[in-house]
Amino acid sequence: MLTAMQFCIALFFVRPVHAQKFDLAATPPMGWNSWNKFACDGINETVIRQMADALVSTGMRDAGYQYIVIDDCWQVSRDSAGNIVADAIKFPHGIKALADYIHGKGLKFGIYTCAGRKTCAGRPASEGYEWQDARQYAACGVDYLKEDWCNTGTQNAQSAYTLMRDALYKAGRPIVFSLCEWGSNKPWHWAADVGHLWRTCGDIGNNWSYMEAGNGNAYGGSVIGNLDLQRGLEEFAGPGHWNDPDMLEVGNGVLSVEEERSHFSLWCMLAAPLMAGNDLRSMSAETRAVLTNKEVLQLDQDPLGRQASAVSIREDLEVFVKPLQGGDTAVCLFNRGDQPKKLDLAWKDYKIGGGLRMRDLWKHQDAGSTDTPYRATIGRHEVIVLRLSKAVHG
Ligand code: GLA
């Protein structure tokens, strides 16, 4: 029997929000989100259902992608009781029916709101309706909520997101909570207790390198811009709480296949949430091979949950290192430059000792050992991803 004092102490330490929180995103969430490809006008229930079908038929579900998330513009108004109302033309069967369909495919369902009065696209948002919205999401079968930060006026970000966290918890359904305030209030310092993932920068664009990344909370705007804004945030990511450099642009028709491989590999090295953002119904075999490369996905989903650090950059060659569970190490060699490069790397320069077997995770073959220097040619904007281990990986 517990004494009264022991009981109180036990209550203090059993914090159900946190228990639920950790289990829901012990590794970075993986899925598909409508925004990068379909933005506001392109979504409707047919598209979303077809995307759920395609997630299954392409093998992506089996590779680990599980959330289908509708981003902005599914909502049009509130009814007289204050309930949020879905666009009846685009979603004639309603959100619950769509969630049921997605669940029927063995997938999970996500939705979007905003902490302000209106969403970024000007639709009704959650300010002042947090408890009611959370209850409605839970009743509809929502498993993942992305909450944006437009039109928030003078609100305090930490308080606003904590309010939604508490509302979601009270609603009684396990819901992954994705904070989308673009890194404006440095969420890595306070959001581990609030959500499962937080955007660290502005929106990615469908391009390789559009804007120069600046300091701190700069915009991003591209694969390279968003990548560079992750530097220095490594220590804040871990099981249950992840830095989010934004969704993938793999398969959206602008990046070359080499750039798609690099974008995807780098996001996996960063232990980033992996939200595909392309049209899954019509993707090329190359894009599908990128998104479902299981050996690279294993780096993202590694249970240790470490975000890679860039240990060196020399003449456009950037080297990322990610420690893995069980003592293996992932190394990503990244040629940021516009010209191919010949590599002749001495592992000791990267503090990596001899005696380790290497496996090339894009060629799916053995790549020798760290006993000798690593020699290869790496194309422009390309990566080579190696898994270093004491045992040989088959
Ligand atoms: C913001 C977010 C995007 C997307 C749009 C929707 O820009 O950062 O990811 O959700 O709003 O309007």
Image: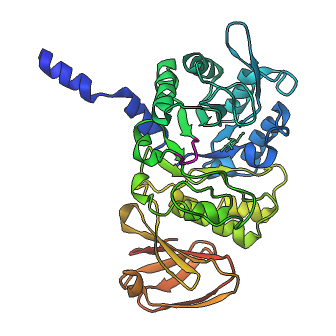
Magenta span includes 170: no
Q: Is residue 100 above or below residue 1?
A: below
Q: Is residue 250 above or below residue 313?
A: above
Q: Is residue 152 above or below residue 243?
A: above
- Which residue is located at x 73 percent, y 24 percent? 95
Left or right: residue 255 versus residue 364 is right
The colour scheme is rainbow
Q: Position of residue 268 (x, y in %)?
A: 56, 60
Q: Does the image show residue 295? A: no
Image quadrant of ligand 1? top right
Residue at the extreme right: 89
Left or right: residue 34 versus residue 387 is right
Q: Which residues are magenta?
A: 180-184
Q: Main secondary structure of the magenta part?
A: loop
- Which residue is located at x 60 percent, y 33 percent? 145
Residue at the extreme top: 80
**Quadrant in which residue 34 is drawn:** top right
- Which residue is located at x 63 percent, y 63 percent? 225
Q: Position of residue 206 (x, y in %)?
A: 75, 58
Q: Does the image show residue 144? A: yes
Total numbered labels: 0
Q: Position of residue 38 (x, y in %)?
A: 81, 44
